[in-house]
Amino acid sequence: MSKGNILFIGINFFPEPTGIGKYSGEMVAWLAESEIKVEVITGFPYYPNWQLANKFNWYKTDLVFESKVKVHRCPLYVPKKPTGIKRIFQELTFLMSSLPKVIYLSILLKPKYILTIAPPFHLGLLGLLARKISGGKLLYHIQDLQIEAASSLNLIKHKKIIDSLLSIEKYILKKSDFISSIHPKMIEEVNKKTSSTIHLLPNWSDLKVMYPIMDKNKLRIQFNLPLDKKIFMYSGSIGEKQGLEMLINIAKQFTHDEDFLFIIAGNGPYYDLLKNVIHKENLTNIVIRNLVPTKELNNWLNLADFHLIFQRNETNNYLFPSKIVSILSVGGICVAFVPELNEVGQLLTQNEIGYVISEVDPINIKMKLIEISQKNANRLKSKSREFAMLNFNKTKILSDWIGNRIFDN
């Protein structure tokens, strides 16, 4: 593979701290460290705040990762409140603005491989165009099943639009040379659309950066948090698909219990709304704050006793919460509010690395959380870290991916 080069196309990229941008950035950085030439076509950072990091929003070229990677940033529309229609418009603006760059770099670089990241799913069309121009191979990697997730959340309500989008996606899948996705359940869903082989490329963790820390009191002092409370933390994006309104209802049940503290650390379009609800309800047992910087994330995740995972039932088969990877890497204990047969639920219960709460009644949930908080956590913490070391090792995952036979053809 080192004899060729890669043209990477994705709307999210470094330095976005969470989600697809995080993994895309780490993937490209790893490729560059492996002496593989990569050039990137992407947008300007906006996630998870849904706000551009600066006012500059026109074509720009940067050098990143010790100047090993050239990044071509293209303008895009970023809505403050990303409704279904606004997100479609956002993705279309990037599709159109990046088109000239795709054509130009396909001619100039003649890449051996074109790597596109979905969502947005239709960036695969740009990948197919680049392949036609350059003669390279299209690698289509699926992080979320975007169309189904949008439909299940009623972000797109018209069946004709859904069917049209699925037809375009089916065409991309048919024409791609190599298709991958992050989780076996998502691969099952993709297999319903195409006869092509779908490869597993799970999200990963840098286990040297994310690791357990035993002295939690020191960490709590660092972040000015109480030493004597059980801390239940949610850390990540605050958006439509997380379903964090459940956490508000749970916290209400603990208003007279001083032994528990709930923390929400994140950014996203629903941050202000959530903060206003907490203030209006006078919930003093919830701390809400922005995401910590990436360099502080390991310390931040380590200070919690338990990590809360929320996922709307409608999106169970279409999205896999990547935050689980980081939580398990620090030896954290997940408490997931999902159906037991959900893939996240099965992962945690079958491997004995976390808890699943399928209850919807806040009173019953309170009883479950109290029960969980009284259990000895040391065994689960050790198993969580061991599971991460076996399954989420960044070097092994990316080395295996590069070693796939498509790169030798």
Image: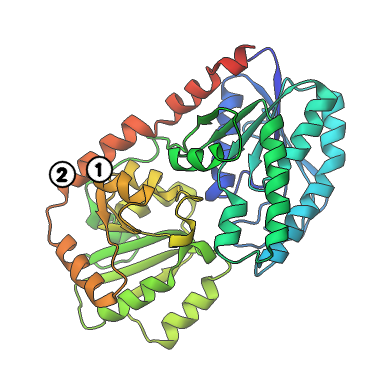
| Up-down relation of residue 361 to residue 70 (above or below) | below
Residue type, mark 1 in image: Gln
Find numbered disc 1 in the image and state the secondary structure of the residue it sits on: helix
Mark identifier at residue 22: none
> Pointer 2: what residue?
379
| Up-down relation of residue 325 to residue 361 (above or below) | above
* Residue 341 seen in the figure: yes
Using the numbered discs, state the Cα–Cα distance from disc 1 to disc 2 in whole angstroms. Answer: 15 Å
- Percent position (x, y) of residue 258? 20, 77
Figure coloring = rainbow
Residue at horizontal 43%, vertical 61%? 313
Q: Nearer the viewer, residue 279 or 68?
A: 279
Residue type, mark 2 in image: Arg
Whether residue 225 sits left or right of residue 56 in the image: it is left
Residue at horizontal 56%, vertical 33%? 180
| Up-down relation of residue 82 to residue 306 (above or below) | below
Residue at horizontal 45%, vertical 27%? 397
Give the total number of marks visible in the rendering: 2
> Pointer 1: what residue?
350
Q: Earlier in the sequence, mark 1 or mark 2?
A: 1
- Percent position (x, y) of residue 173? 66, 35
Residue at horizontal 46%, vertical 39%? 183
Mark 1: few/some/many CA within 10 Å (<14, 14-19, 20+): few
* Residue 9 seen in the figure: no
| Up-down relation of residue 63 to residue 272 (above or below) | above
Q: Nearer the viewer, residue 290 or 174?
A: 174
Of the 4 image quadrants, the one containing the C terminus is top right
- Percent position (x, y) of residue 255? 26, 82
Find numbered disc 2 in the image and state the secondary structure of the residue it sits on: helix
